[in-house]
Amino acid sequence: MEIEKIYNRIKPYIGLVETDTRKLKTDGVFFALKGENFNGNLFAAKALQMGAAFVIVDELHELVSDNHVVLVEDALLCLQQVAAYHRSQMSAKLIGITGTNGKTTTKELVNSVLSTNYKVLATEGNLNNHIGVPLSLLKIREEHQIAIIEMGANHPGEIKLLASLAKPDLGLVTNVGKAHLEGFGSFEGVIKTKKELYDRLADDGKTAFVFSDQKELLEMSEHIDKRLFYSFQDKNSWCYGKWHSKNENIHLEWRCNGVASEVVSPLFGKYNAINILAAVCIGNYFKLSPEQIADGIQAYVPENNRSQKLKTAKGNNIILDAYNANPVSMTFAIESFLEKPVKNRCLILGDMFELGDYSRNEHATIIDLLLSHRDKFEMAILAGKNFQAVQKDDPQLAFFENKEDIPASSVLSSFVNKNILIKGSRGMKLESLLNYL
């Protein structure tokens, strides 16, 4: 069956598409996807019993193809094609965002800024892969003026696929760094994959927002005719910024397309200053006033373990940045934390995953970074087998193979009235240590 015909059949229910029966609503559309350890086709009958208007399957099992059952060759491919077709029917300007670090924070900042004056649809959470992006595209409605779609990848070719589905009018690569090296094979593999968004923009004659302070981004985007640069170094950039810490928060001054202004954000650190400047740049492109841009920046409060600021009963001030970690984001977080104008600094760091053959060297580099700044912190706890494998005997460093062993030790007893950074990969789930701080 042609995609257009499938789309027209399910169009009245397009906002209720799900791939998980646990989230399915009455009159929803269930796409039965398959993976290594699951087969959604086995839940299609249950979806119909729950009141699904349609189920899209590539295996019938006990079902019979009828008005509510659509049999296709590949349910995932069908989902992606239906989403791409839906996107082509919508008039919203679409902004594609990818990068090694800061994708979600930048997306949320841009959303907060643009929402001061526009009806905006933005990727929910981190639904940024080959399934999440189609689901996000299917949520775009006629009333949406702008859609912000986050695109993630851990293998070559993934951004090319996602960009082909989303067909962005505007694009931004936050940065490129060492992450998912196990899947990409090398840093060069990361660059090639992130460049796939630029390639799509170049082919379609669209516009890219480029952070010109990173030379890799300049080189990767040089084939794009329409580039708008933002920078902390080049005063002649389309959007130029300066920042410093103000009461631990970011004070950003900017001049964008000839208009100057400033804002104080509840975020901290240079890496977040870059994300904020990107949002300022995009807000200016959409002709928002400096006041609207500042209001949007100030309104964004991080959550979901991303640079969250917490205060505990023991008097500890915590920056919880335990959603994910790679060598670049870990370095940024540590350096920014150690530059904060506070005393009694301690760190709890967890393993960085998916680094493959680079893992040993990258974890050793983080340890060396800490030791080079030993005068700026009191204690650093390093949790996980990767840090354990390259541990060094030093009184300021405490190594634990498993994070579960940390509370049983006496090391946290001194963590009272401290300023603490918690940073690690998602699989480490370091937020579980909050109960002991």
Image: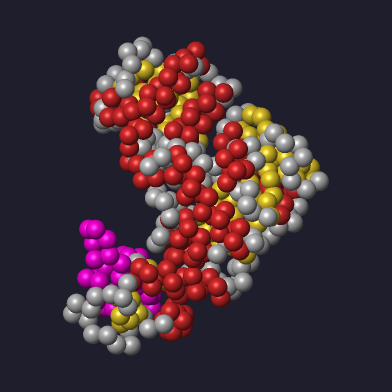
- Residue 264, position as x, y percentages in the image: 67, 38
Question: Would you place residue 395 above or below residue 435 in this image?
Answer: above
Please state if 23 lies on the left or on the right of 141 as rendered: left
Looking at the image, which residue is at 23% across and 62% down? 38
**Can residue 38 be found in the magenta stretch?**
yes
Q: Residue furthest bottom?
A: 67
Q: Is residue 125 above or below residue 419?
A: below
Comparing 393 with 173, the one in front is: 173
Q: Please tell me which residue is depicted at 64% across the width and 62% down the height of the picture.
A: 205
30 shown above or below 316 = below
Left or right: where does residue 116 sit relative to residue 134? right
**Residue 106 to residue 344: above or below:** below
Can residue 113 be seen? Answer: no
Spot occupied by residue 275 in the image (x, y as percentages of width and height)? 59, 43
Considering every residue shown, the one lying at the far left of the view is 62
Q: What residue do we see at 75% from left, 48% from top? A: 290
Q: Residue 316 location, x and y as percent?
A: 45, 26
Q: Quadrant of the N terminus?
A: bottom left
Q: Which residues are magenta?
A: 20-49
> Can you see residue 134?
yes
Residue 412 location in percent, x, y?
A: 34, 22
Nearer to me, 318 or 328: 328
Residue 42 belongs to the span the image colors magenta: yes
What residue is at 50 percent from the left and 64 percent from the top? 164
How many numbered discs sit on the rendered protein? 0
